[in-house]
Image (cartoon, helix red, strand yellow):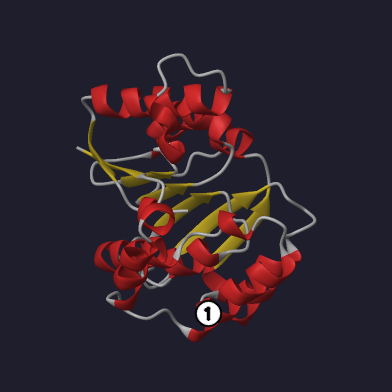
Amino acid sequence: MSFFEEKNPEMDRYLEAHASSESEILKKLRRETYQKTTQPHMISGYQQGRLLTIISQMMQPKNVLEIGTFTGYATLCLASGLAKGGKITTLDVNEDLAYLPKKYFESSEYADQIDFRLQDAKEYLKETDEVFDLIFVDADKENYAEYFRLIKPHTKSGTVVMFDNVLWYGKVLEENPKLKSTQSIQELNDLAAKDDDFENLILPLRDGVNFLRRK
């Protein structure tokens, strides 16, 4: 949920009304996510989907990594800008829900470019030697700081990395947070701001996106 969605829904509707429209397959996926999942709010929002789409289409990346597939909305947004012959690897551990993103991936124009894996992201990052042009992280908030450390060796100059939910509904302002997820997000935001190998900015879009670029 976004700040405006909660505090000023009229402004949130205005922002959505003045963003480019989503594709038919994204509309169907969003609708089915709300019909068939118990936590549909986990889907990347409409506005965030537009951001991911535009960034990917601007970059035309050859190799994309997504940590946290959920129903595949963000995956399809990121896939829309892939270079010819490019691919996106998307990781999740929810076997019960895997049928839904698989269905939409297979029916999309990017079917041959999406590598959907049911695998723990930490294990994958420790095993792979791939270097990515674009990385989006939206899963397992308790391990955000660890993801940052594991991701860095798989980046190069120009790599863009985005972490979702980095404002954590305002909980990042807590001085002594009890939740491990809040602690990890705070640590991530500190690491990103202090790492001289990256430039970063937290975008106050929905629940906050930490936007990083490797120098």
Q: Residues within 10 Å of mark 1 (few under 14, many from 20)?
A: some
Left-right relation of 59 to 45: left
Frontmost residue, 181 versus 104: 181
Say which quarter of the image contains residue 123.
top right
Q: Secondary structure at mark 1?
A: helix
In this view of the protein, which residue sits in the foreground, 54 or 28? Answer: 28
* Amino acid type at image mark 1: Lys
Q: Position of residue 214 (x, y in %)?
A: 25, 39
The relative height of residue 65 versus residue 50 in the rendered view (above or below) is: above
Q: Which residue is mark 1?
A: 27
Q: Can residue 53 be seen?
A: no
Against 76, residue 160 (above or below) is: above
Estimate the x, y position of residue 135 in percent, counting from the top left: 41, 48
User: Horizontal placement of 118 versus 163: left or right?
Assistant: right
Q: Quadrant of the C terminus?
A: top left
Front in this rendered view, residue 104 or 130: 104
Rendered location of residue 200, percent (x, y): 24, 38
Number of labels in the image equals 1
Q: Is residue 179 visible?
A: yes
Q: Residue at x 43, y 49 (%)?
A: 136
Name which residue lies at 70% across and 68% down: 100
Quarter-wise, where is residue 213 in the image?
A: top left
The residue at 24%/46% (across/down) is 158
